[in-house]
Image: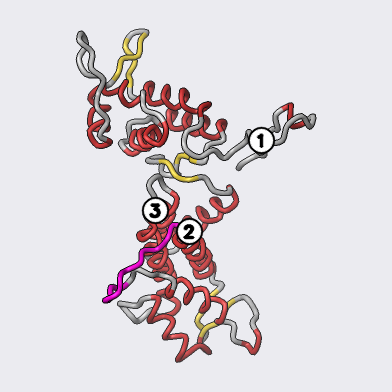
Amino acid sequence: MTTTPRPRFSVRVGLTDTDNHDGPFEDVPVHLVVPLQDWVRETLSYPYDDNMLPDEQRARPICLRLRVPPYRDTFSGPSYVEALAGTTGPQLLDVVDAVLHARAAMEWERDSLKSILDDAGSAYRVNDAGDGLEERVAPAVHDAVRQTIADAAARPATGSAADHLAAAWQAAYGRGPDPVRAYSEAIKAVESAAHAVIQPNHAKATLGTMLGEFKGARHKFSTAIPAPAGDTIAPVEAMMRALWEGQTSRHGAQTATVPETLEAARASVHLAAALVQWFVSGAVVRTP
């Protein structure tokens, strides 16, 4: 559960407004640089007596993957930890994301990072799996999608809808978004959730074949939302068609393939989340 942050004193008395202070801040603003660098340094170190010693073995592969050259010291040799902790800007975000992905952070260290990003007004957050960064969205929206994923995971009839929706979310909002994958996973999530309702006997059903099923037997389906002329399947059909026909990279042709934009991919994830929730909750049913 999230709470509204307490406005700073100067805002409360009307001396300043919130526009220049509260973010969310893209990249790494100056007030976040040192806390993130310290977090990287501390996470990639281990306690020895009363000191923290750099764990170069864990830091070395991260340096290699991110192409970060180690610091050279005449006496102690290369330092991979200090090289990673010395990065700034987008590269520092890459380092934090890579440390999380390498499972190099313990739970309390991940919690510490969450607090740092929250307090600093960062545009990024630790994802639910704790293995990377993702862009921050409105808490209510994120909570709704997370609840849909949990509900789908609890319903065997929805197949792998939960996994696909989670993958779509990560590809859309994770560090280094992949719009094409996000859109593709969003479609797979809906196909998985809708399969048992629309075409349970069609082993290779797709969103396209399901839309075709509506054409020939729309009287066999209904939704919880009333519609004019009794065509209650129209709202879900329109949403599914928008998702299906909006995918620009599904097929190749003589003309150039146009990959989905990040904006389209993110919209597709939220549209898919709504559709998955409808099928999971029983808002869309097949009538006898």
Circle 3 is placed at which residue position? 171
Magenta stretch: residue 252 in it? yes
Q: Between marks 2 and 3, how big is the CA–CA gap?
A: 12 Å
Count of marks overlaid on the render = 3
Percent of width and height locating residue 86: 36, 23
**Mark 1 Cα-neighbour bin, 10 Å: few <14, some 14–19, many ≥20:** few
> Looking at the image, which residue is at 70% across and 29% down?
8
Disc nearer the start of the sequence (2/3):
3
Mark 2 vs mark 3: give the one in front. 2
Circle 1 is placed at which residue position? 5
Residue 209 appears in the rendering: yes
Residue type at mark 2 is Glu
Q: Which residues are magenta?
A: 251-262
Q: Main secondary structure of the magenta part?
A: loop
Secondary structure at badge 2 equals helix
> Looking at the image, which residue is at 79% across and 29% down?
13
Name the mark on residue 263: 2
| Residue 66 left/right relative to 137 | left
Percent of width and height locating residue 268: 47, 64
| Residue 113 left/right relative to 160 | right
